[in-house]
Image (cartoon, rainbow, N blue to C red):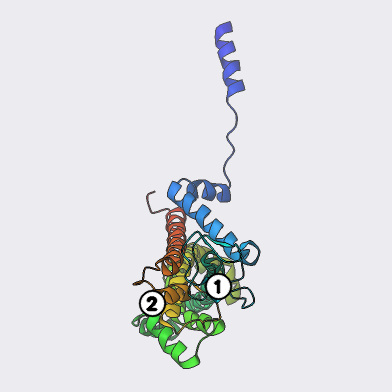
Amino acid sequence: MSTTSEHATQAATIVRPVREQTPFRRFLSDFFESRVATTAIVVFGLILFVALFAPWISPQNPYDLMVVDVMNSRMSPGEKSLDGMTFLLGSDGAGRDMLSAIFYGLRTSLGVGVMSAVIALCIGMAVGLAAAYFGGRTDSLIMRIVDLQLSFPAILIALILLSIVGKGVDKIIIALVIAQWAYYARTVRASALVERRKEYIEAATCLALSHRRIVFRHLLPNVLPPLIVVGTLQTAHAISLEATLSFLGVGLPQTEPSLGLLISNGFEYMLSGKYWISFFPGVALLVTIVSINLVGDQLRDVLNPRLER
């Protein structure tokens, strides 16, 4: 009997009540289960840090005419300039340090991509919620417009708009918003239609709650998870679209730093062996887009319980 009581006492001292994880902690534990996603978010965090603090951590301001010297043009990686500065990634045709130019280009490309994605998300969310909640002719009209826009490639719509309004940061953001809002509207409408038919929405309608309260208090929180995933993936798409448009010469002007412009500036020197002018900005663009896409894929797996991880 004494042995049994001792075992019971030891078991009672060892066993501790297990604390239930909060939804946020559960989300973090599920997200960081994947080493690929963890590596991707660390890489993207480093890219974001570089973009935010580019003016303070860059070896030079590559767009300051008082600093840039044409005599230092097309120097190979690791070569030193006349004033003793080492170009770790080489210099371009204008004598700009490629490492500094990439830092500034990341700053502009991320700013344009995130800003256009956020604005397009807000517009598409509002339109998609209105289509799903009110239904009928409103839904039919909105979805015909969405189907018409989605029948054209986003880059074609952006090209047409920029050929009309011209170059500039604000203009390319507007073009990307117009080219992308339909993706968000379709996603939100599909998720909201599923939630619209559930009992809690019908109960809220029977209680004569206002449309605004039903939409923002009950409907919107349940369509946010897929919207977050689409927003993450579309941010990477917006960055690639901006780089493509700038590479084609219809996006940002030459006075604005951009990864697409840096790739375009070095394209003419590729055959002469000056590969670094286009290669390193291309690698920076590739790593940025891949890291954002990997984070978006992991968010999709975590936020959708139907998917097996």
Mark 1, residue position: 108
Q: Residue furthest front?
A: 82
Circles 1 and 2 in contact, beta carbons < 8 Å: no
> Callout 1: few (<14), some (14-19), or many (20+) C-alpha neighbours within 10 Å?
many
Residue at mark 1 to residue at mark 2: CA–CA distance:
23 Å
Q: Residue 53 at what x, y percent from top left? A: 63, 63
Circle 1: residue type: Thr
Q: Residue 298 at what x, y percent from top left? A: 44, 55
- Whether residue 132 is visible, yes or no, is no
Mark 2, residue position: 268
Q: Residue drawn at (56%, 50%), measured in percent from left and top? A: 23
- Say if 32 sits above or below 173 in the image: above
Dot 2 falls on a residue whose secondary structure is loop
- Say if 303 sits above or below 30 in the image: below
Q: Is residue 141 left or right of residue 70?
A: left
Q: Is residue 68 left or right of residue 159?
A: right
- Whether residue 18 is visible, yes or no, is yes
Q: Residue drawn at (58%, 72%), measured in percent from left and top? A: 62
Closest to the observer, 23 or 278: 278
Q: How many marks?
A: 2
Q: Residue 83 at what x, y percent from top left? A: 61, 66
